Amino acid sequence: MPEHELRDRARAAKLRAKAAKARLKSNRLEAKAKLLSEKASYWEQRADDLDGVVRPQPQPSVAK
């Protein structure tokens, strides 16, 4: 195998590793964001309960 082909394959492998690492980080951040959003909703609900505030439950949006 020519040397330049080996270099190209090594670069490709390095880029694939970088992409995999970025994808893992993205998935972790999505999970963390979802958890934080759920916590925020819970805390808001607790605060509303303490204040005696009644809010309507959000209606799921209907896709057209």
Image (cartoon, rainbow, N blue to C red):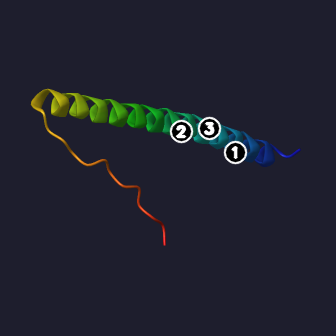
Residue at which label 1 appears: 12
Left or right: 16 in relation to 49: right
Tell which of 7 and 56 is nearer to you.
56
Label number found at residue 50: none
Between disc 1 and disc 3, the foreground one is 3
Q: Residues within 10 Å of mark 1 (few under 14, many from 20)?
A: few
**The residue tagged with tag 3: helix, strand or loop?**
helix
Find out whether the residues at labels 2 and 3 contact each other: C-beta distance under 8 Å. Answer: yes
Residue hosting label 2: 22
Residue 10 x %, y %: 72, 39
Total labels: the figure holds: 3
Type of the residue with mark 1: Ala
Mark whose residue sits in front, 2 or 1 = 2
State the residue at coordinates (14%, 26%). 50
Q: Nearer the viewer, residue 10 or 45?
A: 45
Calculate the distance from the C-alpha at mark 2 to the C-alpha at mark 3. Answer: 5 Å
The residue under label 2 is which amino acid type?
A: Ala
Residue in front for this viewpoint, 4 or 20: 20
Q: Is residue 48 left or right of residue 30?
A: left
Does dot 2 land on a helix, a strand or a loop? helix
Q: Are marks 1 and 3 in contact (CB under 8 Å)?
A: no
Q: Label 1 near label 2: C-beta < 8 Å? A: no
Q: Amino acid at mark 3?
A: Ala
Per the image, the residue denoted by label 3 is: 20
